[in-house]
Each structure stands twice: as structure tokens, then as C-alpha cells.
Image (spheres, rainbow, N blue to C red):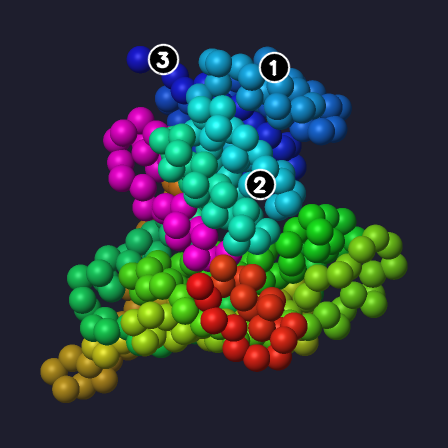
């Protein structure tokens, strides 16, 4: 069988450090071309990884009939533009998160995928960690009972990425830590909960550390918090920050069910339950070396393209995610709860 030929759009750190190990280690993938608007960067990337063809315009790359898959690692603004064009050109698409910078673009991506019949998947690497897979199975088998509330977040004391660059420029990024970090933990929480549909959100957003930036643009939030309601009555509290005066950085998901609950803080998980009438805290033990979630996610995508697996992530889940994020920003602006349609 011939290998799937891959064209990469974007040569930034996320592609080089997070995506390339997955693409280069899959036996059914041949990295055939790379594209970046900065051709010098694309050429340097191609030289480093032994890629033969280099482009500065993704449209020229999409004209190639032999390209089967497009991998996207551009600034957020261009995710939907490149993904839709690639799907319409008959290519399968794997895209870095977030899916898009607004719900309209996310919906266009999902529609293009449906119309083309091609696979569209957006990075959800946290679903593929060993601890995440364990918690998903634990919940799916009913050990938590009804999961009715929880909280999640990713908070940093000082961790603003690319200050003054596209990360902190709303027109290019779509927002700050909510859209950057929120996708990860909100998605993980909702996935374990069984993907209930969000129906309303209330949120707040703050920009308190922009004054420390002497160069470039910083017009996004540095902290966002909120509350999500779902169609099954469940709720989820959220908090995400690039900078705030806290004790230490932390990633967390905590969910509570009628039979048991859990807390996942960074890489440590604890289960809270009752055994024979006695309250018990259980600490699962996982292998010391956890497979890289980015790599496992990309390999799963390739398996889906090859018809070897059913997709763990589907475009409609991406649309729901972007609707949540957009509604939190809107709620923060209006100062009241926003209903999702």
C-alpha cells in the first residue's frame, strides 16, 4: 500500500515540537511538502527534516493531486481558512487547536468536512494521555454514577506566550488563555462527562498584565473565569490564566458524580468514593512513561483516515467548544449569562 502523502502548513514551534514526532513516526505517512508564508523558515524546516518540496502559498500546495493529508499549524486566524480550502480540494485535514476563532468559522469547517467526505480532526492531545483514557473508561462504565458538576482550569503565575506577537493579538489569536489553554481542559472535562451539549454560559475576562508589555499588541485577556450549563443539568466551573498572583502553576479537572468523584491535578489523579460504607481516597498508579498525547492523537487521526478506527473527536464537538469560548467572551462583555443556540 502506498503511504499517505502529507503537506504541512505552518512551521512554528507547535509543528516542530508537537506535531512532527507524530507524523515522522507513523509508518503510513510520507511528509511530502511544507508551506510557510515565510519561505526562508519553510526552507530551513524542510532542510532540517529532509522534506523535498517547499511552498510559500498553501493554495499552490493544495493544487497537488498527490497530497492526501494537510497538517495545519498556523496562527489561529488561519485555521479555518486553510482547513476549508484543503477539504474542498479533497484532502483530509488535521489542525492544531483551537478549531477556529469564532463559531461561524468552526461551523463552516464542519460543513466542509461533511460535504467533502474527508476526515477533519483538531488536536485534542489531552484525551490521549493514559490518565485521561483511564478516567474516561471509569466514567463510561458507570463507576461515577451521574456526573453532575465539576471544575477545570489551567492557571499560570507568569506564563504569557509570545508577548506582543500573534498570541496576544486578538485579531490573529481570537483571545488569550481562554482560547489557548481553555480548549484543553474544558474539552477533557466535557469528554469525560459524556459530551453533554452546552446551553448557557456566564463569564468574566480580565486584562491586568498588558501594561508590562513594552512592544507589540496585547489586547486579549490574561485571565478568564466562567460557568457552563449543559442540557442534562450538569454544570462546570472554569478558570484560565497566563498571569495571576497565585502560589503555583496548575492544570486541573475535578468532576463529581453520585457514586464517586475525582481530581486530576497536573499528572496526579485521586478518586473519591465510598467502599463498604467507608469513605475512601484511591490513587491509581500509572506507568512512569506516558505516551506523548500529541503523537497518539496524530496516529489516531491517520488510523481514522485509513479506516482502521472510529474518530474519538468529531467536528461537531469542535463547534460546541468554540461556541462555549465565544459565549464566555460575549458574557464577559455584556456582564450577564449568554444562551447558546
Q: Tell which of 133 and 304 is nearer to you.
A: 304
Q: Is residue 311 magenta?
A: yes
Q: Are marks 3 and 2 in contact (CB under 8 Å)?
A: no
- Mark 3 and mark 2: Cα distance apart in space: 28 Å
Residue 185 in percent (x, y) is at: 46, 61
Which part of the image, by quadrant, shows the C terminus? bottom left
Q: Which image quarter: residue 212?
A: bottom right
| 332 over 302 or under it: above or below | below
Q: Is residue 48 visible?
A: no
Q: Residues within 10 Å of mark 1 (few under 14, many from 20)?
A: some
Q: Is residue 19 magenta?
A: no
Residue drawn at (12%, 82%), measured in percent from left and top? 276
Q: Residues within 10 Å of mark 3 (few under 14, many from 20)?
A: few
Q: Which secondary structure dominates the residues rendered in magenta? A: helix
Q: Is residue 198 left or right of 208 when viewed as pictured?
A: left
First to last magenta residue range: 298-322
What residue is shown with label 2?
79
- Mark 1 and mark 2: Cα distance apart in space: 22 Å
Check the image and name the residue furthest to the bottom.
277
Q: Which mark is residue 2?
A: 3
Which part of the image, by quadrant, shows the N terminus? top left
The mark nearer the N terminus, 3 or 2, is 3
Q: Which mark is residue 53?
A: 1
Q: Is residue 307 left or right of 41 when viewed as pictured?
A: left
Residue drawn at (65%, 72%), measured in percent from left and top? 333
Circle 1 sits in a helix, a strand or a loop, which is it? strand
Residue drawn at (59%, 13%), measured in percent from left and top? 52
The mark nearer the N terminus, 1 or 3, is 3
Q: Is residue 31 left or right of 61 when viewed as pictured?
A: left
- Mark 1 and mark 3: Cα distance apart in space: 19 Å
Residue 9 in percent (x, y) is at: 59, 30
Amino acid at each position: 500500500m502506498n503511504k499517505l502523502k502529507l503537506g504541512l502548513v505552518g512551521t512554528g514551534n507547535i509543528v516542530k515540537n508537537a506535531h512532527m514526532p507524530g507524523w515522522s513516526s507513523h509508518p503510513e505517512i510520507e511528509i511530502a511538502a511544507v508551506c510557510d508564508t515565510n519561505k526562508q523558515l519553510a526552507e530551513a524546516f524542510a532542510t532540517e527534516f529532509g522534506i523535498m518540496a517547499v511552498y510559500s502559498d498553501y493554495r499552490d500546495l493544495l493544487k497537488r493531486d498527490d497530497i492526501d493529508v494537510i497538517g495545519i499549524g498556523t496562527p489561529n486566524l488561519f485555521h479555518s481558512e486553510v482547513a476549508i480550502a484543503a477539504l474542498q480540494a479533497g484532502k483530509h485535514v488535521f489542525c492544531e487547536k483551537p478549531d477556529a476563532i469564532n463559531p461561524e468559522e468552526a461551523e463552516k469547517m464542519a460543513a466542509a468536512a461533511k460535504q467533502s467526505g474527508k476526515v477533519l480532526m483538531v488536536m485534542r492531545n489531552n484525551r490521549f494521555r493514559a490518565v485521561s483514557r483511564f478516567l474516561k473508561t471509569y466514567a463510561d462504565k458507570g463507576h461515577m454514577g451521574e456526573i453532575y458538576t465539576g471544575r477545570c482550569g489551567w492557571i499560570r503565575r507568569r506564563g504569557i506566550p509570545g508577548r506582543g506577537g500573534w498570541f496576544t493579538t486578538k485579531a490573529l489569536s481570537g483571545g488569550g488563555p481562554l482560547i489557548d489553554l481553555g480548549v484543553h481542559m474544558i474539552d477533557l472535562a466535557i469528554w469525560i462527562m459524556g459530551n453533554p451539549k452546552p446551553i448557557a454560559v456566564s463569564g468574566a475576562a480580565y486584562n491586568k498584565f498588558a501594561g508590562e508589555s513594552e512592544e507589540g499588541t496585547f489586547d486579549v485577556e490574561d485571565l478568564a473565569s466562567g460557568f457552563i450549563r449543559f442540557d442534562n443539568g450538569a454544570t462546570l466551573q472554569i478558570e484560565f490564566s497566563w498571569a495571576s498572583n497565585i502560589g503555583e502553576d496548575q492544570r486541573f479537572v475535578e468532576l463529581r458524580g453520585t457514586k464517586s468523584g475525582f481530581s486530576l491535578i497536573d499528572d496526579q489523579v485521586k478518586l473519591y468514593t465510598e467502599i463498604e460504607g467507608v469513605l475512601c481516597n484511591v490513587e491509581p498508579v500509572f506507568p512512569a512513561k506516558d505516551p506523548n498525547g500529541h503523537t497518539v492523537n496524530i496516529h489516531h487521526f491517520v488510523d481514522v483516515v485509513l479506516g482502521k478506527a472510529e474518530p474519538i473527536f468529531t467536528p461537531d464537538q469542535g463547534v460546541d467548544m468554540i461556541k462555549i469560548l465565544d459565549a464566555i467572551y460575549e458574557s464577559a462583555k455584556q456582564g450577564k449569562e449568554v444562551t447558546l443556540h
